[in-house]
Amino acid sequence: MLNRRNNDFMDIELLANKINLNSELKNNVLSLVERDRAKLISLCKKADNDNFKSVFSKNDMIKLAVALLYSVEFTYPKYQKAVISDEIYFETMKDIAVWCENNNNKGLKNLPWIKNHLNFELFKLGRLQFQFYKCNNKLLDYSLFPFDYGEKVIYVHIPQGEKLTLESVRESIIQGMAFWGKEMPYLCHSWLLYPGLKDILPEKSNIIMFQNQFQIVETDWDEREAEWRIWGKVQRNLNVYSENTSLQRAAKKYLKSGKVLGSGLGILKPEYFL
């Protein structure tokens, strides 16, 4: 359990340490909380009522302070009540630090994503994240899926920062099913599921072995997340893309041949439900 001290400020420091928040950023946000705690708690309460919309327009440091405060004040008690381990709590909240790193440790820019963690809807179980999700995407052809519009599914996400081995993926899926059960379909939408990756990567690559755990149902040809993930940004001029890794070299050659790197939407294969 979190070791609660005499005030919540110390709890935030413990959380920041456990999720490996950048030390300079941690000190800055702790100073902000110490100085404006009442105001930030008020923002947390507003966020609780309007699903964080009141915080999206604030600066990145305020977003980070609200996320940490909210996690301690509102989210962690839900973990306690549901008897979910501190290990899962801290592993889940590490995404806060990851997205701060993606913002050059200037604060938390992607609060719209982190709100899923704070809302007690998304959990990191091993290598992967699993989100309870009501599928209300009107653009999907539901005749292709084992669920209908508005039904509940478990959304599988692949957080950055760790090696994506087949063993870690399978272990994580087993943990996810122990947590969520096998009654709902497991859905994943990612550039890692783009079928064209099989044209540029070896069969035994981690990405292709991950892809093979899913039945690809739909393909998004316009999505360019692959380029952002491979190079850190999306460029109009393909010539500026670096060729420092085998994936970068293969992907650049693929794009320059006139093809695209999109994304795929897949369902976890039936053998996991046996």
Image (cartoon, helix red, strand yellow):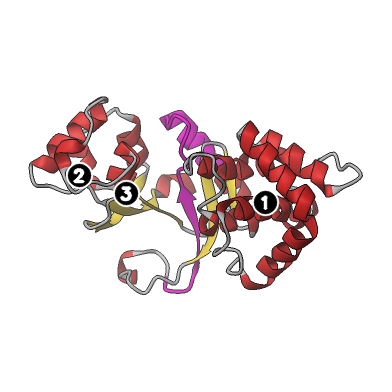
Query: Label 3 sits on what residue type?
Result: Glu
Q: Is residue 152 magenta?
A: yes
Q: Is residue 103 above or below residue 221?
A: above
Nearest the eye: 104 or 16: 104
Provide residue 10's location: percent of width, then percent of height.
82, 41
What span is in magenta?
148-175
Q: Tell me the CA gap for discs 1 and 3.
A: 28 Å
Residue 196: give its label: 2
Q: Which residue is mark 1?
A: 65
Query: Label 2 sits on what residue type?
Result: Gly
* Kind of element beneath mark 2: helix
Q: Quadrant of residue 196?
A: top left
| Residue furthest left as drawn | 257
Q: Which residue is mark 3?
A: 225
Please say if the residues under marks 1 and 3 sit with CB atoms less than 8 Å apart: no
Provide residue 194's location: percent of width, then percent of height.
27, 47
Looking at marks 3 and 2 on the same chain, the residue that comes earlier in the sequence is marked by 2
Provide residue 106's location: percent of width, then percent of height.
54, 43
Comparing marks 2 and 1, which lies closer to the viewer?
1
Nearest the eye: 12 or 176: 12
Q: Is residue 154 magenta?
A: yes
Q: Relative to residue 139, is residue 85 drawn left or right?
A: right
